[in-house]
């Protein structure tokens, strides 16, 4: 593979201004995914001449798309092929950073032993893995999966980021649902830096409101005039995680309840927002997120 230097990366962005930078490589055969420091540059092949395609292909690593293409669920998720087995399934997306001496066979074996209800497991790029799991009485929770992946990372000297999809019936359009979940995973990786494993519930407010809020003159005016220092930011986020409960928030922040009440009153005087009311707490929380 030809190494893409910082100079020619910049040139590619200038030559192809419609190209998009994404966190993951594209699984679409009609999109070239060129590795960048910040992710991958997606270039639509339909916009390229045959000569350009051959030239740019030199920048694309030899990823395991072909290996993934032999799996049944690759066809279901990427090619919209029908599901042969009825049931309810979820897709767990894994972005895996690994060393050159990575023990792939042993890593896969661990997965198959830990997830008794798995139906497919495959790499679809060099570092992107899909685990398809059927719904059962004993599927792991987000908290349990966090512990599992921390253990796997320690055992195999890897670094995982994991998105746990929702369970969907085989009668649904699984390819369409997976495509949206894949986009959510790509877009929200930076937002959940402290978490190894997350689901749509962890990022829904941020993901589905950020575009609208960025375009809102009212919200931008709020952000410009609302001063939230680090202490108040911590209070709002902790209050949110405790569903507005003052006592639990004070305990988590190692703050006396009366001191917390005083901070909230001062913030209300300065901003006009009473975060003891859930509607106003949600607004402040969204302002912090976006």
Image: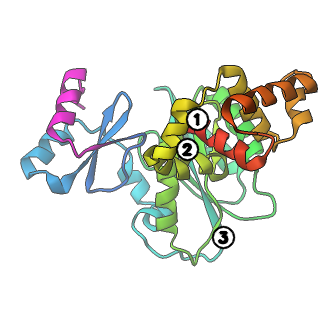
> Between residues 110 and 255, which one lies in front from this camera angle?
255
Q: Residues within 10 Å of mark 3 (few under 14, many from 20)?
A: some
* Residue 94 circle label: 2
Q: Is residue 19 magenta?
A: yes
Residue 218 at x, y percent in the picture: 51, 45
Determine the residue positioned at 72% across, 56% down.
116
Q: Is residue 93 magenta?
A: no
- The residue that mark 1 highlights is 160
Please provide the residue range marked out in magenta.
1-20
Q: Residues within 10 Å of mark 2 (few under 14, many from 20)?
A: many
Q: Is residue 164 left or right of residue 116?
A: left
- The residue that mark 3 highlights is 88
Q: Is residue 260 left or right of residue 25?
A: right
Q: Please, what secondary structure does the residue beneath circle 2 have? A: strand
Total label count?
3
Q: Please, what secondary structure does the residue beneath circle 3 have? A: strand
């Amino acid at each position: 593979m030809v190494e893409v230097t910082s100079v020619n990366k910049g040139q590619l962005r200038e030559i192809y201004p419609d190209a998009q930078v994404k966190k993951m490589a594209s699984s679409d055969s009609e999109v070239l995914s060129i590795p960048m420091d910040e992710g991958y540059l997606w270039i639509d092949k339909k916009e390229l001449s045959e000569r350009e395609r051959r030239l740019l292909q030199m920048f694309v690593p030899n990823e395991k798309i072909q290996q993934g293409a032999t799996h049944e669920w690759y066809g279901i998720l990427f090619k919209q092929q029908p599901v042969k087995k009825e049931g309810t399934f979820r897709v767990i997306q894994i972005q895996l950073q690994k060393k050159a001496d990575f023990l792939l066979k042993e890593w896969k074996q661990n997965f198959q032993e830990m997830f008794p209800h798995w139906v497919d497991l495959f790499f679809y790029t060099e570092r992107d893995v899909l685990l398809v799991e059927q719904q059962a009485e004993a599927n792991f929770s987000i908290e349990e999966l966090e512990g599992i992946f921390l253990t796997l990372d320690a055992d195999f000297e890897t670094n995982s980021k994991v998105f746990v999809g929702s369970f969907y019936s085989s009668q649904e359009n699984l390819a369409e649902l997976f495509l949206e979940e894949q986009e959510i995973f790509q877009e929200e990786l930076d937002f959940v830096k402290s978490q190894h494993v997350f689901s749509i519930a962890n990022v829904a407010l941020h993901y589905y409101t950020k575009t609208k809020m960025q375009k809102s003159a009212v919200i931008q005016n709020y952000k410009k005039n609302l001063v939230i220092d680090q202490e108040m930011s911590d209070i709002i986020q902790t209050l949110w995680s405790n569903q507005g409960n003052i006592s639990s928030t004070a305990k988590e922040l190692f703050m006396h309840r009366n001191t917390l009440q005083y901070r909230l009153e001062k913030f209300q005087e300065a901003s006009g927002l009473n975060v003891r009311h859930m509607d106003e707490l949600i607004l402040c929380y969204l302002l912090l997120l976006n």
